Image (tube, helix red, strand yellow):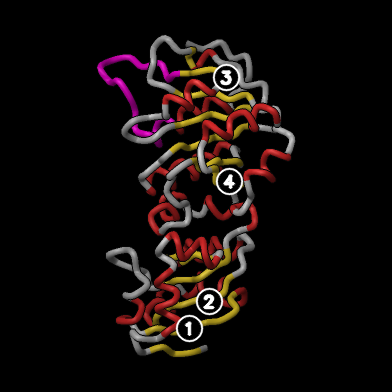
Amino acid sequence: MEHITSRKNETVRAAAELRRASVRRGQGAFLCEGARLCTDAAISGLSMRALFYTQRAEQKYAPYLEKIRPLAEKIYLLEPAVADLLADTKNSQEVFCVCDMPTQACVTPQQFYAKPAAGMCVALEQLQDPSNLGTILRTAEALGIGQILLCGECCDPFSPKALRGGMGAAFRLSLVRLPALPEALPHLRRAGWRTLAAVPDASAAKVTKTRFDVPTVMAVGNEGSGLLPETIRACSGCVTIPMSGRAESLNASASAAILMWEMTRECGDERG
């Protein structure tokens, strides 16, 4: 174990750089913060390049660190002032790790198109809030939806906020980045997927009345403007969440949760 006391240490500074999406993509690695999340990364089978923690974290989170240490390639003991360089939270637990991106998070569009369509999939277009993304990934995993398409300028599922919101779901889901959803939709249909656009339009088919007995990609749009018009036109159909009262729309993560719940309900359930 190496004891790092200087804030100028190159290993720590390189780890801190992984908070930037471009660096994560370039290195194929990400920085994880928190005893529970680092433990989750380790037991999910991710390759852990480095583990960092302070002496007080070693005392407070000993049961977690006992599980992580045997799986880390390198271990570093940090002074609290050095740990601050890695922290993204106000009251950090002072436990961090650098992991390789999981293999299932590096699926290319061509690899995804080549697989026969199966199960349910959610396509997120231009989602901007990493906390929303994390919540959606966590819900998807809980409901058994293992495939997520990240389309256009969608935020990064391995950003610190998205990782915290997802509680490690990104470690286990199949994540595919698509440059633009409208151009991808014909490829998805050729692979056997039905493509549905989720829209806040009362004239669209109610998702509660829609059968999900075929492989389906559900497109969910940006928090502010929803799906792009060209995406809606290119989908094979539209569905909406029926709402009463004065609400006209829902938060992106709330909408996605309802849609995914309906997608994974038993087919043929006659509900209003």
Q: Nearer the viewer, residue 205 or 144?
A: 205
Secondary structure beneath dot 4 equals strand
Does the image show residue 133?
Answer: yes
Do the residues bearing badges 2 and 3 touch, measured as CB atoms within 8 Å? no
Mark 1 or mark 2, earlier in chain: 2
Q: Is residue 197 above or below residue 117?
A: above
- Which is closer to the viewer, label 2 or label 4? 4
Q: Is mark 1 on a helix, strand or loop?
A: strand
Towards the viewer: 99 or 33: 99
**Which quadrant of the view contains residue 91?**
bottom left
User: Of circles 3 and 1, which is in front?
Assistant: 3
Q: Give the range drawn in magenta.
A: 240-255
Amino acid at the residue labelled 3: Ser
Q: In which quarter of the image is residue 68?
A: bottom right
In the image: residue 137, left or right of residue 161: right
Amino acid type at mark 1: Tyr
Helix, strand or loop at label 3? It is: loop
Residue 249 covered by magenta stretch: yes
Q: How many residues crowd mark 2 within 10 Å: few (<14), some (14–19), many (20+)?
A: some
Q: Earlier in the sequence, mark 3 or mark 4?
A: 4
* Mark whose residue sits in front, 2 or 3: 3
Q: Which residue type carries mark 4?
A: Val
Q: Give the labeled residue for mark 2.
A: 50
**In this figure, what is the number of numbered marks?**
4
Is most of the magenta stretch helix, strand or loop? loop
- Whether residues under marks 1 and 2 lie with C-beta atoms below 8 angstroms apart, the answer is yes
Give the residue at x 58% y 66%: 100
Which residue does the image show at 46% across and 28% down from the upper left?
A: 258
Which residue position is annotated with label 3? 236
Residue 132 x, y percent position in the rendering: 39, 43
Q: How far apart are marks 1 and 4 (CA)?
A: 33 Å
Q: Distance between the residues labelled 1 and 2?
A: 8 Å
